[in-house]
């Protein structure tokens, strides 16, 4: 898999123009109703605090609908649980500053424990403490009105907005899929790149609250689990080539090339006199070195590289140690095959030496 390195400046992608317009209109309706209800329930003094917390929730619900923070249980539970925590702190902790800190801190803890983390829930807890006498006089009724009622109003507005967006998505994204019988005729697809992921995100036509880097990490982890599941407990020693052809540091390049041609292999481990691994040399290493030499074709350049040098002033590499890659990635013979596959995928290599004790 191509290792991705770019992150899209905080957000994965912008919403489409239609989605932004529809979401904004939905927020106008939802927050407008919330403001009207809150004003009549808590009066002009507590009204700004209550509506402000719901405004923050609206930004998440309308602009980042696929975030884990905006799931229905996160939205509903986060507000109600936090509101209950805030009322408890307001009634049992006389110091305003300590009660404020405890309300938010305990609300975060409760949302974590109940798996309903929703940032505006912290505001709901804090408002119960600092919202003034009108809000504090409600006691635990504050959890139901205005918080619970506002959650119901805004949640209903968001639900219908998402229904409208989903309908438009189905109309925009309809296209015929290949028939099942044609699946075997599809060409092999190379590992996707960051541009491929970015294009896929734009094609979804909705906001995805995840970066390209996060997607890459998720994909790599999923592939690792898939390899472990499909390969089971198979170890490297079960499938490795046991009759290993190798070279030493001082062996001539021509000898190493002849061994590759003779055994039809593309890499050779490089060992020292004690048969310990010191590096690896591959066909790619030969080609990279040949590209620096004179010649019209790669074949001519390879012949020049492999041919022993006449004279003592040539800077052309002559022995394996001058081309080998070192240090080399290796695995123990009792390592899982899935670990080797993960290395092939992450490092973009096709040969890994397997070592015994």
Image (cartoon, rainbow, N blue to C red):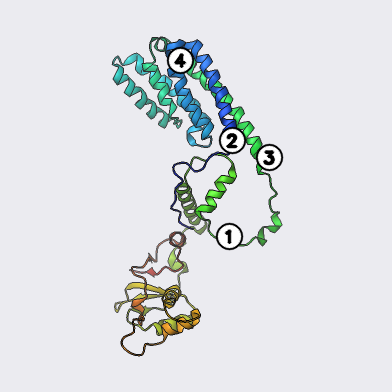
Q: Camera-side residue: 33 or 327?
A: 33
Q: Which mark is residue 128?
A: none
- Whether 71 is drawn above or below 200: the answer is above
| Residue at the spot 39% in from the left edge and 26% down from the top edge | 107
Q: Which mark is residue 189?
A: 1
Between circles 4 and 1, the one closer to the viewer is 4
Q: Measure the C-alpha gap from mark 4 to mark 1.
A: 57 Å
Q: Measure the C-alpha gap from mark 4 to mark 3.
A: 41 Å
Are the two marked residues, 4 and 2, in contact with CB atoms closer than 8 angstroms?
A: no
| Residue at the spot 29% in from the left edge and 79% down from the top edge | 273
> Where is mark 4, residue-wise?
47
Label 3 crowd bin: few (<14), some (14–19), many (20+), radius 10 Å: few
Occupied quadrant, residue 311: bottom left
Occupied quadrant, residue 286: bottom left
Mark 3 element type: helix
> Where is mark 3, residue-wise?
171
- Whether 51 is drawn above or below 161: the answer is above
Q: Can residue 35 be spotted in the picture?
A: yes
């Amino acid at each position: 898999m191509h290792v991705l390195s770019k992150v899209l400046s905080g957000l994965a992608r912008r919403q489409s123009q239609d989605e932004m317009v529809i979401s904004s209109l939905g927020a106008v309706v939802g927050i407008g109703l919330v403001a009207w209800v809150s004003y009549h329930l808590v009066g002009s003094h507590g009204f700004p605090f209550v509506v402000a917390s719901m405004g923050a929730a609206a930004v998440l619900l309308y602009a980042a609908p696929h975030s884990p923070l905006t799931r229905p249980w996160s939205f509903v539970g986060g507000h109600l649980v936090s509101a209950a925590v805030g009322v408890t702190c307001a009634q049992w902790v006389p110091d305003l500053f300590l009660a404020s800190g405890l309300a938010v801190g305990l609300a975060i803890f409760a949302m974590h424990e109940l798996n309903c983390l929703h940032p505006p829930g912290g505001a709901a807890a804090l408002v119960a403490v600092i919202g003034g006498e009108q809000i504090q006089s409600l006691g635990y009724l504050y959890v139901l009105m205005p918080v619970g009622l506002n959650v119901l109003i805004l949640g209903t507005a968001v639900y219908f907005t998402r229904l409208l967006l989903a309908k438009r998505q189905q109309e925009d994204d309809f296209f015929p899929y290949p028939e099942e019988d044609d699946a075997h005729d599809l060409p092999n697809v190379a590992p996707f790149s960051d541009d491929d992921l970015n294009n896929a995100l734009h094609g979804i036509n909705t906001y995805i609250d995840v970066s390209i880097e996060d997607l890459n990490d998720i994909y790599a982890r999923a592939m690792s689990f898939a390899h472990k599941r499909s390969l089971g407990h198979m170890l490297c020693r079960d499938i490795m080539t046991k009759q290993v052809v190798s070279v030493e540091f001082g062996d001539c390049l021509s000898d190493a090339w002849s061994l590759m041609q003779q055994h039809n292999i593309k890499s050779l481990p490089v060992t020292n006199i004690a048969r310990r691994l010191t590096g690896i040399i591959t066909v790619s290493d030969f080609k990279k070195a040949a590209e620096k030499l004179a010649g019209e074709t790669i074949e001519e350049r390879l012949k020049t590289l492999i041919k022993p040098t006449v004279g003592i002033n040539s800077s052309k590499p002559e022995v394996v140690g001058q081309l080998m890659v070192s240090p080399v990635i290796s695995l123990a013979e009792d390592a899982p095959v899935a670990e080797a596959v993960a290395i092939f995928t992450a490092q973009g290599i096709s040969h890994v030496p397997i070592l015994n004790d």
